[in-house]
Image (cartoon, grey):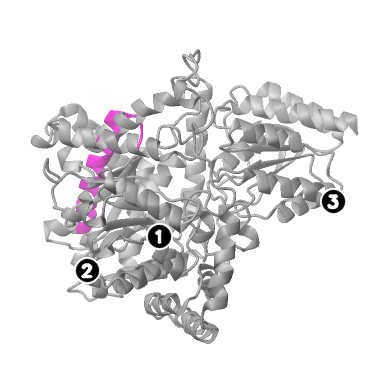
Amino acid sequence: MASCTQYTCFTNPGRPEMVTKENPWLFRTYAGHSTATASNALYRSNLAKGQTGLSVAFDLPTQTGYDSDHELARGEVGKVGVPVNHLGDMRALFKDIPLERMNTSMTINATAPWLLALYIAVAEEQGADLTALQGTVQNDIIKEYLSRGTYIAPPAPSLRMTTDIAAFTQKHLPKWNPMNICSYHLQEAGATPEQELAFALATACAVLDDLKGKVSTADFPSMVGRISFFVNAGIRFVTEICKMRAFVDLWDEICLARYGITDAKYRRFRYGVQVNSLGLTEQQPENNVYRILIEMLAVTLSKNARARAVQLPAWNEALGLPRPWDQQWSLRMQQILAYETDLLEYDDLFDGNPAIERKVAMLKDGARAELAQIDAMGGAVAAIDYMKARLVEANAERIAKIESHETTVVGVNAWVETTPSPLTAGDGSIMVADPKAEADQIARLSEWRSARDENAVQSALRDLRAAAASGANIMPASITAAKAGATTGEWGLMVRSAFGEYRAPTGVSPNPSNRTEGLEPIREAVQVLSAKLGRPLKFIVGKPGLDGHSNGAEQIAARARDCGMDIHYEGIRLTPAEIVNAAVQQNAHVIGLSILSGSHVPLIRDTLLRMQQAGLSQIPLIVGGIIPEDDANALRAMGVAAVYTPKDFEMNRIMMDIVTLVDRAATAA
């Protein structure tokens, strides 16, 4: 392993305002898994290969404010990111990586104050000058209610903690980006380009409106300049280029007209990007390499709307956890474009292009209309229900176009014939999370608790809750708690006790939509079966565990509703016990669970056991998610009636499968 001082990223920690051949965008891969120690080894390896910044993925318990030994964390520890329970974990995560010379992006939202507090504590232990720290916390809580689901508290106090971070960094971390307005997950949830523009910009306005009261008038313009964005680049190449140019224009317009920012440098639209994961296919996954490249070009070709940090997914993310080699392949793609081509040697290639200008104008007009609607409703916080419903509807339209072949997806609904790929052959084609990592993490958490000064911890937690309740800035008390040895779950408990729990809207209307294409045979079959059952077919749709990616569950619930089924869908973050209890109370005929976090085996095992104990063994249980075939076979062997993965895009077929399964169960009974 090369020493830290030899890493490319450490030789020039400062980033220029303009991307150039000599100083291209930051190269990142989104990474973190299993344990802090394992993730640290991965980070140091990636840095040695030429990565120029870190992008930290945290596991779901960390994102939602639970310790690794909490009931809801079961099966989720280390699955979609690294678990960080306390200061010891953060030390291990950045061991031998000098934070003063690093640019670190942390994809963290509800627990952003806490993870930033831990980061600051580790930096101080390293002897770092805090004013030199560079990086970003995503800290965009509004999109969590709309698309990602890792919220903790209700919207208003959550927004308050977002701006607490911004105000704190203004005084103490002048080079740190306190917020990354994230439209990435909006597109993943099905947003149109106009919705992605408008909903992200409305979020930025909500933040700045709240921040005005926390920083001085003199400091406010520079804080506007420190707001950054994190966007998505999809496969519609020209549209994505135009969307980014529209973002630049609209942000400049808002900063000048709404906030009176006269200095152009503070109106600059600064953004990082991860290209689209929604469009990555399980079928013929090698095709994803081309998709990723095309999507990267959309955010790098236009000089006046070029990303300042780029992270690329791996080609096989629709199959499971990418290996280090897969991440390296994505990194090399960036390096080739930046250093081997002449892209960064020219002015903007699209200025003056009439087709581009027309499309940009159309997108801006559509976004302005959406922004006006949101403003009329009282702003982004007040419009959460409206925006969520719009996203669910837009995603339904996207899926319907793929089903009807109006939208072509190579290898999915066209040219599906294929030769087996050597890239996915044999064992080891995807990385498997260490099955012992969760037990190891919990054991070290227990050791941490037993070794700390409990009086100091409890005193710090009392002060933290008091700060939350009083309206004081949450950061100083969070830092004190971090240094005292408090845990992520304890920080989350204080936030919940001060602000209360919250359940975001599902966006699934109880009323059927106007889409009818291909539904008549299914509706007829549902009616016939409902008559046979003596009441409408009852379908429980559930999201067990901490997985907040609810797009699939929402679309299944909405399509089942349109087919005439009586659906029950409460949204995300339910325990197996709560789902089974709902099935008993609702007298369900079928249960469908959606899990994309990799925790399907333990959660389904628990659900099946509880169904048996509740006398529901005769009810079919179906499961959907990113599930490797070996796991799918294991689930079927446990008693799961059907398993669906991203390759199963024909939802009408799934609806007919449900009818058949319920009919078979009713006949057997």
Left/right of residue 528 with respect to residue 411 in the rendered view: right
Question: Eyeballing the image, is 488 above or below 1?
Answer: below
Q: Is residue 253 magenta?
A: yes
Separation of residues labelled 2 and 3 (CA atoms): 57 Å
Rendered residue at 33%/55% (across/down): 105
Q: Residues within 10 Å of mark 1 (few under 14, many from 20)?
A: many
Q: Nearer the viewer, mark 1 or mark 2?
A: 1
Q: Nearer the viewer, mark 1 or mark 3?
A: 1
Image quadrant of residue 537? top right
Q: Which residue is mark 3?
A: 613
Q: Amino acid at mark 2?
A: Pro
Question: Eyeballing the image, is 570 above or below 131?
Answer: above
Q: Where is residue 102 drawn, in percent x and y?
A: 26, 58
Left/right of residue 394 with respect to residue 123 in the rendered view: right
Q: Where is residue 9 drawn, in percent x and y?
A: 22, 52
SS at badge 3: helix
SS at badge 2: loop
Looking at the image, which residue sits at the far front? 1
Q: Which residue is mark 2?
A: 174
Image quadrant of residue 214? bottom left
Quarter of the image with the C terminus in it: top right
Q: Amino acid at mark 3?
A: Gln
**The magenta segment:** 233-255
Q: Where is residue 219 drawn, in percent x and y?
A: 19, 72
Q: Earlier in the sequence, mark 2 or mark 3?
A: 2
Q: Is residue 263 magenta?
A: no
Image quadrant of residue 234? top left
